[in-house]
Each structure stands twice: as structure tokens, then as C-alpha cells.
Amino acid sequence: MSHTLTALSVALPLASGWSVHSLWMRRRIETARRDPLTGLWTRDPFEERARKSLARRRQLAVLVLDLNRFKEINDTLGHAAGDAVIRATGQRLGQWAEEHAGVAGRLGGDEFAAVIPGCSIDKLGANLHALTARLDRPVPFGGRSVEVHASIGAAYYRTGAGELSTLLRRADEQMYRAKQRGGGWRIAQRLTVPEMRTVNGRRAGRRGTGGEAA
């Protein structure tokens, strides 16, 4: 009996130590998969979670959004102001997605994406209207308010209606159309032949496609 107690007294601290180390490692790995500026998932972990949502949901909405004239903010107010705008946008989008049982990510630069569980087209429109109002609130920086305006595109998904890459492309197309008219949101309700020329599954003109910048 004494040998058993002695063995336990040695094993328990070791087990506890490994448990703490394992938890620490998991937290380190998760932190590395999140964008340090906004706290949102980076592209790969976001897409992993988005694909899981597609696999288990009958309908949902895939969103792509970016900020209008973001380069002007960096050029006129500096990169610190740009970082403040990106941080605020990511936090606002992340909170909105969480409120709708969804997931959000930062794809890079001022480009973000989100997936939320399905609802009717009318309800989705109301949700996007509320999101636009939230994202378009001025961001305080250096004793002043920085004007922010977002353009949002959404693709409405039903079971079997397309892969994530297709949905992101269609949402991206609608986001670009919203941007052309000055901001706001647009929904692609049906998945048809792409309306715009694409390169490697992305709308020509998006960063990384080799076309003109949007």
C-alpha cells in the first residue's frame, strides 16, 4: 500500500504538469492561427470552420467584405490609424458573427469573411443592413473620428448548392458591385455562371489575381 501511495504521489504532479503543458500548447497553437490585430481566424482556419458549417447546415450565408478607400486612410492619417480601423472592423464583425452563431475571419489586408447559419433572404437582408450600420460607425483615433465605410457581398447557400470557393467567389463579386455603387451590401441568391472573369477562382482585379486593383 505504501508503495502505491508513493507511486501516486510521484505520478500526480507529473500528470498535472503534462496537463498544464498540453493546455499551454493548445493555446499557443490557437493563438498562432488567429490574426494578431483583430483576434479573428486567419484564412486557413477560417476556411476549415466554414467548410464544416457547410457540411452540417442546410442553408447559410457566406460573406465577403472590405473597406472603401482604406488606402486613403493609411496615406493621409498613417498606418497606425489604418490598424485602428482594421482592429475595430474585425472586432465588430467578430461580435456580429458570434451573435448569429457564425464564424468570421480576416483574409488579409482590409478583406474579411464570415459564415452565418441560414435564414430567409429577407432576414439575411435585415442582418446585413444591421451589420453595415455597425461597421460604418466612425472609429476614434488620436482624438478624432475616422470615417469608415464597408462593402459587403453575400452568397446564399442551400444544401448541395456549391463549394466554399464558389460561394466566396460569388460573395466577392457582389461585394465588388456594392463597392461600385458606393458601399452597402448585395446578395447573390442563385449560384449561376460567374458574372465576372475570374482567375484561380477569384474575381479578376482582387489582390493576388494579377488584374487591376478594385
Image (cartoon, grey):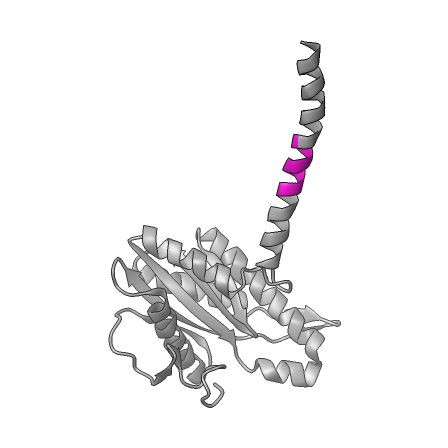
Q: Is residue 171 left or right of residue 6?
A: left
Residue 16 included in the magenta stretch of the image: yes
Tell me what residue is drawn at x 33 percent, y 54 percent.
55
Stretch of the chain drawn in magenta = 15-22
Image spot of residue 78 (x, y percent): 70, 80
Residue 10 visible? yes
Where's residue 94, x and y in %?
Answer: 53, 58
| Viewer-closest of 80 and 141 | 80
Chief secondary structure of the magenta span?
Answer: helix
Nearest the camera: 95 or 113?
A: 113
Quadrant of residue 119 within the rendered picture: bottom left
The structure residue drawn at horizontal position 64% and vertical position 81%, both measured from the top left corner, is 73
In the image, is residue 151 above or below residue 1?
Answer: below
| Residue 213 falls inside the magenta stretch | no
The vertical placement of 70 against 152, above or below, is below
Horizontally, residue 76 falls left or right of residue 102, namely: right
Q: Nearer the viewer, residue 173 or 47?
A: 47
Residue 196 in percent (x, y) is at 33, 84
Number of disc labels: 0
